[in-house]
């Protein structure tokens, strides 16, 4: 499903959610009463429950989870986002997002979900698999900041669960990974398309082999809803992107406060090379500063292990 900003289906959906007669809804959304009736049938096919009363008209009683229309409304509030794509299954939302612009792409499952460092991302139904694709006129050197900002958005969205950020961009709940971010970009200096892919374990089962390191939110909150988590992430992306780049200093300070890595003994490996020492800081472009007997080193990417755990 594709929904663009200003789509009449969104207007009808909002009116049906509030409740009203077919005539009122049709007028407010600028469509015919038959169009409203047809849209209600479509909502029912998608799993929404709409009450129809001769006197009071239509009223939304319940929504499926995930709820494509609630999610479209949330995604289209992000500054710069013009369209929302909702898939039942796609190979990878990041792969798809590179082909479109100024969009949020969500899929209920992925057949070839991609993780960092060329890994696979398990993407069974029940998780949030989303990518934000934005054309940005920023220097390429600023792109890591967008990745950091996105990690903070997810961490804020999962605040109720006591989420923390493990460098470079994993979000942890109870010390286990609940979300990962894969940022990619296509284009050139000052004309880049930034794709931020976010995966969150929400109602999906974590594979047995990963259970000691990963967690799914339903393990700590049996009532958690995919729509709610997606909506909170979109709200936080909106807040932080509106403040970027002017308030970058404040964003970075908050990122550091929520960091689970600063202050720990770490081993960071990147393509066979290892840096071991104490993580003391994250610099303005997201590099981890590690101090050891050999001195101070900045690591820009890689996999981070805690050695004093
Ligand atoms: C990581 O390895 O920690 C990053 C995982 C990123 C997974 C997300 S799910 C949505 C988007 N589409 C993909 O193929 N990958 C990212």
Image: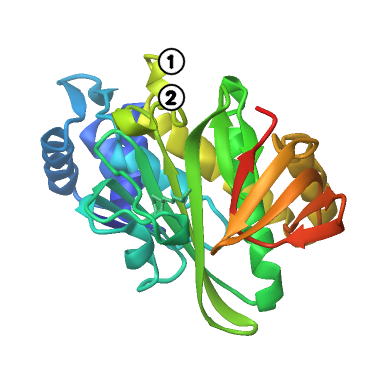
Question: Is residue 247 among the parts visible in the rendering?
Answer: no
Residue 190: image x %, image y %?
65, 82
Residue 73's label in the rendered image is: none
Q: Secondary structure at mark 2?
A: helix
- When the figure is inspected, residue 285 is found, relative to residue 149, above or below; the finding is below
Q: Mark 2 and 1 residues: CB-CB less than 8 Å, in contact?
A: yes
Which residue corresponds to mark 1?
221
Expressed as whole percent of the image width and height from the top left, the position of residue 136 reads 60, 73
Q: Say if 197 sits above or below 59 in the image.
A: below
Q: Is residue 83 visible?
A: yes
- The residue under the point 49% across, 57% down is 182
Q: Nearer the viewer, residue 304 or 240?
A: 304
Image quadrant where one finds the C terminus: top right
Residue shown at the point (84%, 53%) measured from the top left: 249
Q: From the viewer's perspective, is residue 162 above or below residue 295?
A: above
- Decide which of 173, 137 is in the foreground and name it: 173
The residue at the far front in this view is: 293
Coordinates of residue 27 in the picture (x, y in percent)? 31, 45
Residue occupying image coordinates x 14% and y 33%: 44
Q: Percent x, y for residue 95?
A: 34, 66
Depth order, front residue of 235/291? 291
* Secondary structure of residue under mark 1: loop
How far apart, in angstroms, are the residues tagged by discs 2 and 1? 6 Å
Residue nearest the observer in this picture, 108 or 8: 108
Mark 1 neighbour class, 10 Å CA radius: few under 14, some 14 to 19, many 20 or more: few
Left or right of 283 in this view: 79: left
Image quadrant holding the N terminus, namely: bottom left
Applied colour scheme: rainbow
Can you tell which mark lies on residue 217? Answer: 2
**Location of residue 202 by image quarter:** top left
């Amino acid at each position: 499903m594709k929904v663009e900003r200003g789509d009449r289906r969104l207007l009808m959906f909002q009116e049906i959610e509030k409740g009203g007669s077919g005539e009122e809804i049709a007028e407010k959304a600028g469509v015919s009463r038959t169009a409203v009736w047809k849209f209600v049938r479509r909502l029912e096919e998608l799993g929404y429950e709409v009450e129809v009363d001769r006197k009071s008209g239509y009223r939304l009683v319940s929504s499926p989870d995930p709820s494509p229309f609630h999610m479209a409304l949330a995604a289209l509030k992000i500054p710069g986002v013009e369209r929302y794509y909702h898939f039942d299954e796609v190979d990878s939302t990041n792969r798809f997002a590179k082909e479109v612009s100024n969009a949020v792409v969500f899929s209920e499952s992925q057949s070839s979900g991609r993780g960092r460092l060329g890994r696979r991302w398990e993407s069974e139904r029940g998780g949030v698999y989303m990518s934000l694709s934005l054309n940005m006129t920023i220097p390429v050197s600023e792109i890591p900041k967008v990745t950091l900002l996105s990690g903070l958005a997810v961490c804020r969205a999962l605040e109720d669960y006591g989420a923390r950020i493990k460098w470079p961009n994993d979000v942890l709940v109870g010390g286990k990974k609940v979300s990962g971010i894969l940022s990619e970009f296509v284009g050139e200096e000052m004309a880049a398309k930034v794709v931020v892919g976010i995966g969150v374990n929400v109602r999906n089962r974590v594979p047995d082999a990963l259970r000691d390191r990963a967690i799914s939110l339903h393990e700590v909150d049996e009532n958690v809803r995919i729509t709610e988590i997606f909506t909170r992430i979109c709200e936080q992306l909106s807040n932080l992107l509106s403040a970027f780049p002017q308030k970058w200093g404040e964003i970075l300070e908050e990122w550091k406060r929520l960091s689970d890595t600063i202050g720990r003994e770490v081993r960071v490996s990147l393509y066979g090379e290892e840096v071991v020492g104490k993580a003391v800081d994250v610099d303005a472009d997201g590099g981890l500063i590690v101090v050891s007997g050999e001195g101070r080193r900045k690591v820009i990417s890689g996999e981070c292990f805690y050695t004093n755990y």
